[in-house]
Every structure is written in structure tokens, then in C-alpha cells.
Image (spheres, rainbow, N blue to C red):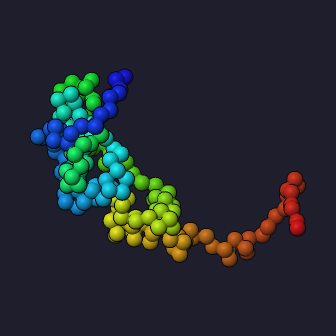
Amino acid sequence: MNTTTEFQLVDIDKLVPYANNARTHNKEQILKLRSSLREFGFVNPVIIDREYNVLAGHGRIEAAKAENISEVPCVFADHLTEAQKKAYILADNRMALDAGWDEELLAVEMEELQNLGFDLGLTGFDETEIADLFDTNSGDTVKDDDFDLTTALEKAAFVQRGDIWTVG
């Protein structure tokens, strides 16, 4: 298996965006990326080849330019063929869409961040998504399981040889 091993800060003006990049970045997403850069720094490097062609990170580059960042962290993926580069550009963007969320764990994490006073908008979720998450996972909502307590209590209880009872 080939692995990228070289990491380098690269002048943002040297980077060449992929002309046929099918992934789009709307203004709202760029604003979220800019907020993320301001809060967390540039922690997710851009993937490039030896000619500084961008394979992954187009949105981060656009956000960095808007933030007047002159150098960005890059990882060189120089072991890929031309066909692999094209395929990786598509795969990198597509595979993230297949991931889901564990709604309960997401709600726990968001609640912990909220309790710490962290701006939940910096997580990339919009206000409606956050509100829906808290509404869906609130303790006020109880799902009925159709268990009939009265019927269960009316059934005769039996004690059989070998049953163990703990009293007290």
C-alpha cells in the first residue's frame, strides 16, 4: 500500500484547482469553512500532486483565500497515476456522503458542547438542524410500546420449583 508521507506548507497562489472539479461550494458552506478556519485553524490539509494540482481541499482553499491566508498545509499524493487522481477527486467527495450519524451520540456531543458554552454553529450544523436534534432527543418524548399493564397484572403469577426469590 502506498502512503503519502510528505507534508509541507505551500503558498496558496501556487495551488492549481482541478478544472473539472464536479463538487460545488456555495457561499453558505464557504462561510462555515471560514468560521472553522478562524476557530480551529487549518487542521485538515489540502491533498496535492507534485505539480501543485489540487486533489482534495478546494473549498478549504477558497475559504483560506477569503481569510487572507497565504500558506496552507498540504500533503503530496505523488504515487497516484493520472487516472487514480481523477478517481480520487470524485471518491474523496462522494464517500463522505455515505456516512451517517448516530443521532443519540450526536445529541450527547452537542449537549456537552452547549454546556461548555461552545458556539454550536461552528460545528457546521445550521440552527434548524440543531433545534431538530434537540427536539428529537429530548427526554419529554416517550414512545409508546403498546404494553398493556392491566392485562399483564391480571395474568396469574406462578411459582415453580427452582425459582429463586429475593425479598427485602
Q: Residue at x 88, y 67 (%)?
A: 168
x, y percent for residue 3: 35, 26
Report the side of 109 relative to 26 (left or right): right
Q: How many marks?
A: 0
Q: Name the spot of residue 149 as percent of width and height, x first.
A: 66, 74
Residue 2 x, y percent position in the rendering? 34, 23
Q: Quadrant of residue 8?
A: top left
Q: Quadrant of residue 36?
A: bottom left
Whether residue 90 is visible to the viewer of this picture, yes or no, is no
Tell me, yes or no, if residue 106 can be seen here.
yes
Name, please, the residue furthest toward the left.
Answer: 19
Residue visible at 27% across and 29% down?
Answer: 77
Q: Is residue 68 left or right of residue 160?
A: left
Residue 47, by quadrant, is top left
Q: Position of residue 114 (x, y in %)?
A: 47, 67
Q: Residue at x 35, y 27 (%)?
A: 5
Instruction: Kindly identify the residue that appears in the image at 50 percent across and 65 percent down.
Output: 116
